[in-house]
Structures are given as structure tokens and as C-alpha cells.
Amino acid sequence: MIRKRKRKQLAYEQPKTKNEVHFPLESEQTKQAIQEQLQNESSLIFKEVNVQDQTIVVCYISYLIEQTQVDSNLLAPLIDSKEKWTTTRLETNLPIGNGQQYDTIEQVCSQLIKGSVVVYIENEKSAITYSISKNERRSVEKPERESIVVGPQSAFSESLETNLNVVRSRVQSNELVTESFNIGARLPTEVRLVYLKSLANDEDVQTMRQRLNNLKIDDLEDASVLVQYIEDTNKTVFPLFYLTELVDRFSYGVSKGKIGVLVDGSPEAIVAPTTFWGFFESTEDVYFRWSVATFFRMLRFAAMFISFVLTPVYVAVVTYHYEVIPTNLLVTLGESRSQVPFPPILEVLFLELIIELLREAGARLPTKVGQTIGIVGGIVLGQAAVDAGLTSSVLIIVIAMSALASFTAPSYLMGSAVRVIRYPLILLAGLIGLVGVTFGICLLIIHLLKLKSLGRPYFLPVYPFIFKDLDNSLFRLPFSISNRRSIALNTKDPIRYQERKSKKPKDIEDWGE
């Protein structure tokens, strides 16, 4: 058993290297070699130009380059030439900038994915590349729903080519695969399946590919609509796939071995598979130090629990369990509720409804007006409700804490799910007290244990329990300790980086020792 483990470890430490393909090559051999190196990239364009009995191959990835420059400054001079082209003449005579020569297919492909155009004269010893990349970085637009303090601020747009461009700029690897699908019988929409071939689990890729191929619909409006068609079940309020508008969140998921999906016309991207705990992770957790990141992640978990438990517990305690309230607080609570004519459950539902109305109004109105309505409306309505005797001042604090806690989840979909499950718990608390709250929480946990995301358990790594994956979900450890990818994802290469057994760094004055 020990010997087998050692062999497996060595296989990860020494990945197999591919044999480099050198020029000269025939035109068809060149095309085939580039396609194989770039995993049959769907947007890879080949154009052949025949000049003076010469065959010149022009190759580029359509969404990474400026097409007008290729047509006017590269293809036109090639076609109009009355002399034979040589590699040296290509490098200096085209009005497209200085070219660079490369003598292997691997070097050429590394430039292709950075936004270069490759020009190769058949049977020559090297190819020329020209950088004509698009400047699509979305630097002027920031994410609206997934705000972060530390890290890249770029968000996806409605253009699929722009989204592919910014993803390629973040994941510059020839192992990145982008498979194209057309979904919609009447109004076809292009969908891209994105993953790293050297990392992503083949079963997950095949499962997602099969779900996209089997989808028979008239049209596809958005990525959020696609999720509802391909998720494992629709009998839940919890999101089973992660929808993100952040480029770095999407790229981070792909680099961990997950699968991404981009939809033309949608400013959001899909990441799968995911877990319940993954919706409380943020890319800021990577940028912060491990101790700070762990504290914030634990704070989000605690806030989630407070959000859907605090108001039901208040209803249960005030209705059935006065004995658990401290005496001093009980006097204050009794005075606060003495003028309220409604039972606690109606009082709580009334205030929860007001909060939801304010939240929806603030989201639908223009940004500046919406912020004013949310702040002023909450203060005015809350104070007016207390003065009118419709609610108690203690409940105002409880509702405010519950509402604030629901905003701490990085995912808006998970925050919305937590808001929804709060209402059944309030009803159970009003009917049978804390027993009802406990019963509701047990049903909720059972429901979460039964869910799956792309065929994988939704509650990983708590159930099934995987101890080594806890640092990838519940908390974060230092990079020097956490050097493995998630075991639950079953990636092809579970080791993220090799630990270097080096001595403790010396101070400057100790280097002479």
C-alpha cells in the first residue's frame, strides 16, 4: 500500500512532457498541429493565401484580435504582393508592426492565446507572429452585486467574445478548452463550456456536456435560465450552481479544476460543481492573510445562521418560552410589547414584509434614489410603527440584525434563499415554539444532505466527511500547509504546488555564516 502511494505521488511531481513539433511543415500539418495543441479551439481561424506558387497560412483566434487590422494590414498586402515572400521579408515589410519568429508549434500557440496572429510560409523553418490583440478588459465597469474590496474589479459583459477575452487574459494556458454549443431551436444562442483539460474531472466534463447537448428548447435568455434547465433538481430554494459576474471568481474556479459555462448575451457565468459552503467563500479570502480570511468566513457562516434563526427564536420565546429570558430583559420586553395588540407571529411577519418591500423598492429604483428610500424609509417606518403601537422596539432590533446578516453572503442567490427559508421557520415557531424551530432545522439539514451539484454531494466535505477538504471550505490555512486541491473534485492533478523543504530564511547579517 505504501509503495503504491509513493508511485502516485511521483506521477504528480513529474508530469509527462509532450514532444515539441518543429517547423518546417506542410500547410495541412501546420493546421492539424495547432488544432491539437489548442484542444480544437472553436474560434480558431485558418486562412490560406496563394501568392507566386507559395502557400501562406494565416491563423488567429477570432475573439482575441482586431479583425479590421488583420484584413487591411495583413491579408491585403499578402494578396497584392507580386514577389515571393520570405520569412525575413514578412518580418519587416508588413505594415502591422514588428513580428517575432518562432520555430515550434508550442511557441506559436503560446502567442496565439495572447492575441497574436500567426503567418507561416509552407515548408519554412519558422513562423512569424504579430500582436493584434483586442483591449477588452472591462476596467471601467465594476461588478454590481458581488462587490469586493481587494482584488480585480472587472466584471463580465453581455458579449461572449469579450468574456472569452478577459478569461483568456486571466488563464493564459494552452490547456484551456472552450467547447462551443448552440442552444435554442428557434433563436440559437452560443454557449461555451470552459475547463482546464489537465485538471478537470472527465466525468464532470462529460456530464455537463451531455446536459447541454440534451437541452431541447426554443431559446435561451440568460445564464440564470440555463442553470434552471441543467441543475440536478428544481425542488429546492438553494442554488446548485454558482452564478458569478466576477472574472476572477470564474477563473479561480476553473484553475481549481471546476467547469465554467459562458452564455452569449449574459453578464453572468456558471461555475460547477459547487457546494453549500462554497457560496460563503469569496475571492478576497485568497487575497487576505489566512487568519483574516478564516475569521471573515466564520463570520459569514454565523451571520447565515443568525439570519434565518433569530426571528423564529424570538417568536417562539415570546410566545411559549418566557422562562428562558433573563429577568431584567423580560421586564424591558414586557414594557415594549405592552402596547402591541398583535401576537408575536403577526408582528414579526408584518415587519418582515416591510423589510422585503423596502429591499425590493431599493433594488428596482435608480441607485441614488434607491439608497435614499432604503435608509429613510427604514428609519421612518420603523419609528412610526413603534409610536403607533404596531410593533415593539426590541423586535425592530431583531429584524434589523436578521436583515443585515442576510447581506453578508457573497452570493446574492444564497442570501435570497436564506431569506425565503426564514418564513416557514417563523410559522413553525408560532405554532409549536422551539420544538418547531428545531424540527424545521432538522428538515432543512436533511434536505441539504440529499441535494447534489453536477452529480456530486452538495454538503461536501461535511457529508460525506472529508477531513482534508475542510481547509478548502470551512476555513483557510496558510499556503505552505494547504498545497492540495479539493479531494472531492477528484481532479487529475490533486497537488497544487510542491512543498519545498528549505531551511528557515536568514536575516541579512546571517548570510555570511
Image: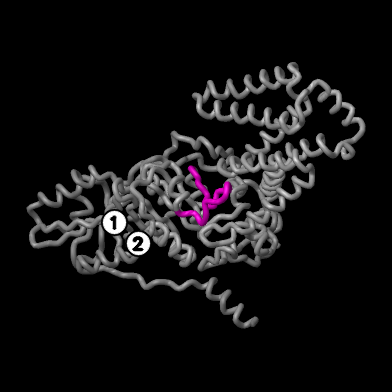
Which residue is at 30% across, 63% downward? Answer: 35
Residue 266 in view of the camera: yes
**The residue stretch that appears in magenta:** 230-245
Q: Which residue is mark 2?
A: 38
The question of residue 207 being in magenta is answered with no
- Name the image quarter holding residue 29: bottom left
* Residue 306 location (% of width, % of height): 72, 41
What amino acid type should be assigned to the residue bearing mark 2?
A: Leu
* Residue 369 location (% of width, % of height): 53, 21
Q: Which residue is mark 1?
A: 44
Residue 85, disc: none
Marks 1/2 in contact by CB < 8 Å: the verdict is yes
Which residue is at 70% across, 17% downward? Answer: 384
Secondary structure type for disc 2: loop
Query: Where does the N terminus fall, quadrant-wise?
Result: bottom right
* Residue 6 location (% of width, % of height): 60, 78
- Camera-side residue: 68 or 310? 310
The question of residue 243 being in magenta is answered with yes
For disc 2, the neighbor class at 10 Å (few under 14, some 14 to 19, many from 20) is many
What amino acid type should be assigned to the residue bearing mark 1?
A: Leu
